[in-house]
Image (spheres, grey):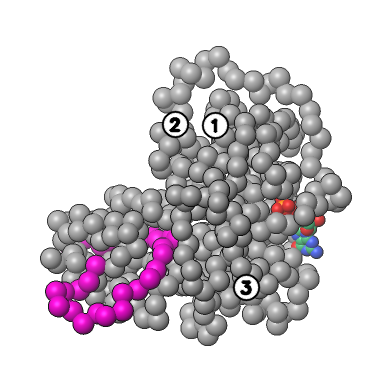
């Protein structure tokens, strides 16, 4: 399935780079160097990830970007090409990243590549990592929160998912590859049975930005259908329509998304979509401002929802007879406190954090003053009612 060899935009040539070897002083500098942002670039096989990265490498953006490409598609590579673009000069070398297996991919080859990359910290100020087309970004994203080493030197700026407009509908309706990987996958996330859930769903549901690519291959009508389907799965991601991954700009589209450090934009971009995806959807739960001592209750509620896939029941003896069978892939939220401060919630799968929000300007709109939690996942049910009731009653207990 790999088409890089006959690409028009062939990957840069391999050149020797002595200038990039680790600076002996870098160990001393480590403490003072700020964390480097990383954007994960995901998307199904052939969606245009490498095309996007090549596009970025040739644009003027004034950043030294370390790009780790996934040149050999989905073999478990033992080497990854690393390109750093510096003053218009591209330098590529190959990094040993050890042996990885995409099925057991908490430590996949991408993560190992990052570990080798951090040995030369200071030679770049941004990282772009192309994940393999079959990888679930939900496995990689939490590494930046859980891994002491990587988490202290890198922060996740956002997840960009390339979508192949021509093939996405078919991919969304295809059975998940998990069945065949299962033998290899014990203890991994069990996606259960139920509506079809493909890798394409996982990649779309985790996205902060969706680049709807290859639009030259579809009609405007087909494009509309695809857009509807995508936003039914993930209504919060920003969607950019492209061909050959040529985004209108790079900053704010692929770089510097700050998807995990502020949440201006929890409003759904396309409302009232009629074609719900049977497998994954987005819901938003809003409640009035809470007291500071209710924040730990929200934390407990999230533990139940994210770790146990259990929605705390509103009250004893409640008539709730059909507990939802759900699974959350991505969750973000903002808690407004009665004292005027805010907290931000971020979760990818079962890893989550609640932290202080940077002070946000109060624009006086009452809707801005509500707590809001957005959940993306499967089996969320037809209405937000059970979610809202559960949250509201749980935090008051
Ligand atoms: N027609 C058309 N072709 C495209 C477009 N974007 C990319 N391609 C071509 O599609 C092929 C695959 O693109 P890549 O950028 O290599 O895709 P990828 O996601 O990196 O692929 P893998 O790494 O194999 O998963 C290449 O031949 C690209 O030139 C597009 O918008 N329209
Ligand atoms: Zn690629």
| In this rendering, position of residue 317 left or right of residue 320 | left
Q: In this picture, is 244 found above or below 100?
A: below
Q: Is-magenta flag for residue 313?
A: yes
Asked whether 323 or 246 is in front, the reply is 323
Q: On the image, numbered disc 3 is attached to which residue?
A: 173
Q: On the image, numbered disc 1 is attached to which residue?
A: 115
**Residue pictured at 48% horizontal, 50% vertical:** 186
Q: What's the CA distance linking mark 1 and mark 3?
A: 36 Å
Q: Alpha-carbon neighbours of circle 2 within 10 Å: few (<14), some, or many (≥20)? A: few
Q: Is-magenta flag for residue 331?
A: yes
| In this rendering, position of residue 297 left or right of residue 332 | left
Callout 2 touching callout 3 (CB < 8 Å):
no
Mark 2 / mark 1, whichever is N-terminal: 1
Secondary structure character of the magenta stretch overall: loop
| Residue 82 quadrant | top right
**Residue pictured at 80% horizontal, 48% vertical:** 4
Q: On the image, numbered disc 2 is attached to which residue?
A: 149
Residue 53 at least partly seen: no
| Residue 182 quadrant | bottom right
Residue 215 x %, y %: 73, 69
Q: Secondary structure at mark 3?
A: loop
Q: In this picture, is 378 found above or below 345?
A: below
Callout 2 touching callout 1 (CB < 8 Å):
yes
Asked whether 180 or 112 is in front, the reply is 180
**Residue pictured at 71% horizontal, 69% vertical:** 167
Residue 69 at least partly seen: yes
Residue 177 x %, y %: 61, 60
Mark 1 / mark 3, whichever is N-terminal: 1
């Amino acid at each position: 399935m790999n088409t890089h060899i006959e690409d028009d935009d062939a990957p840069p040539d391999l050149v020797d780079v002595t200038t990039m070897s680790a600076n002996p002083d870098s160990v001393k500098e480590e403490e003072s160097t700020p964390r480097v942002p990383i954007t994960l670039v995901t998307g199904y096989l052939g969606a245009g990830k490498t095309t996007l990265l090549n596009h970025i490498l040739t644009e003027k953006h004034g950043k030294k970007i370390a790009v780790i490409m996934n040149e050999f598609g989905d073999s478990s590579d033992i080497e990854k090409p690393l390109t750093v673009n510096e003053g218009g000069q591209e330098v590529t070398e190959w990094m040993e990243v050890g042996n990885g297996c995409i099925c057991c991919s908490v430590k996949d080859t991408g993560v190992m590549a990052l570990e080798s990359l951090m040995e030369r910290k200071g030679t770049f100020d941004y990282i772009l990592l192309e994940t393999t087309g079959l990888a679930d970004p939900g496995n990689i994203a939490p590494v930046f929160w859980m891994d002491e080493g990587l988490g202290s030197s890198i922060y996740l700026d956002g997840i960009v998912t390339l979508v192949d407009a021509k093939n996405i509908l078919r991919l969304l309706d295809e059975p998940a590859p998990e069945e065949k990987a299962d033998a290899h996958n014990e203890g991994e996330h069990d996606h259960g049975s139920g509506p079809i859930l493909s890798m394409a769903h996982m990649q779309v549901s985790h996205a902060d930005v969706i680049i709807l690519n290859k639009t030259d291959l579809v009609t405007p009508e087909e494009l509309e259908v695809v857009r509807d389907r995508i936003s039914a799965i993930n209504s919060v991601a920003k969607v950019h329509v492209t061909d050959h991954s040529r985004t209108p700009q790079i900053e704010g589209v692929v770089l510097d998304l700050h998807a995990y450090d502020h949440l201006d934009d929890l409003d759904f971009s396309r409302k009232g979509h009629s074609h719900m995806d049977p497998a994954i959807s987005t819901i938003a739960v809003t409640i009035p401002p809470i007291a500071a001592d209710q924040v730990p209750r929200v934390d407990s509620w999230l533990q139940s929802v994210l770790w146990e896939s259990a929605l705390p029941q509103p009250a004893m003896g409640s008539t709730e007879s059909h507990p939802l069978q759900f699974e959350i892939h991505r969750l973000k939220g903002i808690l407004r406190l009665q004292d005027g401060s805010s907290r931000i919630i971020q979760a990818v799968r079962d890893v989550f954090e609640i932290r202080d929000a940077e002070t946000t300007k109060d624009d006086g709109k009452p809707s801005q003053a509500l707590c809001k939690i957005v959940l993306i996942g499967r089996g969320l049910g037809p209405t937000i009612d059970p979610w809202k009731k559960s949250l509201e009653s749980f935090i008051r207990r």
